[in-house]
Image (cartoon, rainbow, N blue to C red):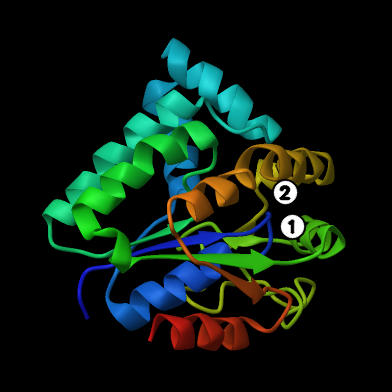
């Protein structure tokens, strides 16, 4: 398969990370999880005295999107590295603001060609998003999320992938989730109009289905 760039959008808890991992494995692409990348950056113990990192961590932990210019610079640098190595790429929720989109899309078009860039929107109601996020637990080792709908956390003590222990993110506090949903509506969804103007087809997928069903729909449209 020719090198492609896939962009997955959707509110918190829509399954972007899960689908990105499935697609990366199936299509031999790199999943650039910008959320996890930024989380590791702002929580790096060696960077906590850095004033910019302290500023960005405060935003990140409160559920507010980080400074667009800061994120764009970091994402652009990593994207070019991935392309230079000959890999296709999958973004789960990025670019997240109009500023980032205006900066990153021209770069992606230059690197991968617009015809090789695919955009998917995983749609889930706000109520589902809040429920999924408030119940979310992740493995402290491999970072895989436990699908609590199918594996209740009360009976699941260890990660089914690596047997690591679970933890909850600061981002999944109910109050923070509502802030994140507001950020998605106000700052991310406007990107869709920009993409349409640039000639992109927005593929809308029902994100409330079981992950394997969502995956099959995305895969069929990519094919």
- Quadrant assignment, res 171: top right
Say whether marks 2 and 1 touch (CB < 8 Å).
yes
Along the viewing direction, whichever of 79 and 120 lies nearer the viewer: 120
Residue 38 coordinates in the image, percent (x, y):
46, 39
Q: Which disc number belongs to residue 187?
A: none
Q: Earlier in the sequence, mark 2 or mark 1?
A: 1
Horizontally, residue 90 falls left or right of residue 175, namely left
Q: Residues within 10 Å of mark 1 (few under 14, many from 20)?
A: many
Q: Is residue 212 visible?
A: yes
Secondary structure of residue under mark 1: helix
- Disc 1 target residue: 133
Q: Which disc number belongs to residue 172?
A: 2
Horizontally, residue 51 falls left or right of residue 111, namely right
Residue 190 coordinates in the image, percent (x, y):
63, 43
Residue at position x 34%, y 34% in the image: 74
Horizontally, residue 115 falls left or right of residue 12, namely left
Gap between marks 2 and 1 measured at Cα: 5 Å
Q: Residues within 10 Å of mark 2 (few under 14, many from 20)?
A: many
Residue at position x 77%, y 60% in the image: 129
Residue at position x 41%, y 76% in the image: 23
């Amino acid at each position: 398969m020719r090198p492609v760039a896939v962009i997955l959008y959707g509110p918190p808890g829509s399954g972007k990370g899960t689908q990105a991992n499935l697609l990366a494995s199936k299509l031999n692409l790199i999943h650039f999880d910008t959320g996890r990348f930024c989380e590791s950056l702002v929580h790096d113990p060696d960077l906590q005295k850095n004033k910019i990192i302290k500023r960005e961590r405060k935003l990140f932990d409160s559920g507010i999107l980080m400074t667009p210019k800061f994120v764009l610079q970091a994402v652009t640098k990593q994207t070019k590295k991935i392309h230079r190595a000959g890999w296709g790429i999958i973004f789960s929720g990025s670019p997240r603001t109009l500023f980032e989109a205006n900066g990153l899309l021209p770069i992606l078009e230059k690197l991968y060609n617009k015809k090789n860039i695919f955009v998917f929107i995983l749609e889930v109601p706000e109520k589902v998003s809040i429920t999924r996020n408030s119940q979310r637990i992740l493995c402290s080792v491999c970072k895989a999320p436990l699908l609590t709908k199918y594996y209740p956390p009360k009976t699941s003590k260890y990660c089914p992938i690596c047997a690591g222990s679970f933890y909850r993110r600061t981002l999944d506090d109910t109050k923070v989730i509502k802030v994140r949903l507001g950020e998605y509506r106000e700052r991310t969804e406007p990107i869709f109009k920009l993409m349409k103007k640039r000639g992109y087809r927005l593929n809308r997928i029902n994100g409330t289905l079981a992950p394997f069903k969502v995956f099959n729909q995305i895969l069929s449209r990519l094919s």
